[in-house]
Image: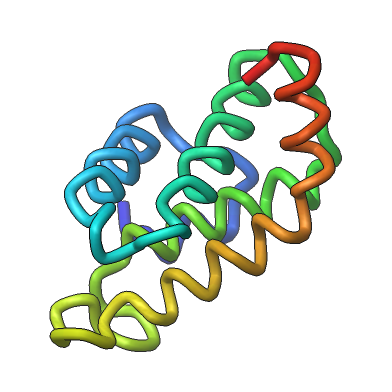
Amino acid sequence: MDYLDNYKRDNISESELNAAARKAEKKKNVLGKAFQKFKDLWALLEAVMSGRMKIPGKTKAIIIGAILYFLIPTDLIADFIPAVGYIDDITVIAMVYNEVKDLIMKAKSKGII
């Protein structure tokens, strides 16, 4: 299945989540501060998908979109371009994180993530 097809659904497979986590772990030096934001987004989505937390469908779709965007190597700025390839990925992660930051803090305070 093409990753772009996933934008049309409100779910993400466990293998896609794991692929995103592996990519983030490999690129954590490039991601800098966005690495922790990505991990928080991933943890929130994992909590939602496991039923430990409920969030609006639109919010879930936005988080899934950000994770899938991160997975696509040939997005707006191709990831293989040295020094600038992850700028768009970092921007998307930061924007989505800022949108759901309150949910992340709530989940952390309740020990959900």
Horizontal arrangement in the rendering, residue 20 relative to residue 8 (left or right): left
User: Where residue 82 appears, x then y in whole percent?
Assistant: 14, 85
Q: Quadrant of residue 44?
A: top right
Q: Quadrant of residue 51?
A: top right
Q: Is residue 5 above or below residue 88?
A: above
Q: Quadrant of residue 86?
A: bottom left
User: Where residue 90 appears, x then y in whole percent?
Assistant: 45, 70
Q: Is residue 85 above or below residue 99?
A: below
In the image, 68 versus 101, the foreground residue is: 101
Rendered residue at 47%/53% (across/down): 67
Disc count in the image?
Answer: 0
Colour scheme of the picture: rainbow
User: Where residue 1 appears, x then y in whole percent?
Assistant: 31, 51
Q: Is residue 102 above or below residue 46?
A: below
Rendered residue at 33%/45% (across/down): 20
Horizontal arrangement in the rendering, residue 66 relative to residue 56 (left or right): left
User: Where residue 76 appears, x then y in whole percent?
Assistant: 39, 87
Rendered residue at 64%/44% (across/down): 10
Screen quadrant of the C terminus: top right
In the image, 95 versus 69, the foreground residue is: 95
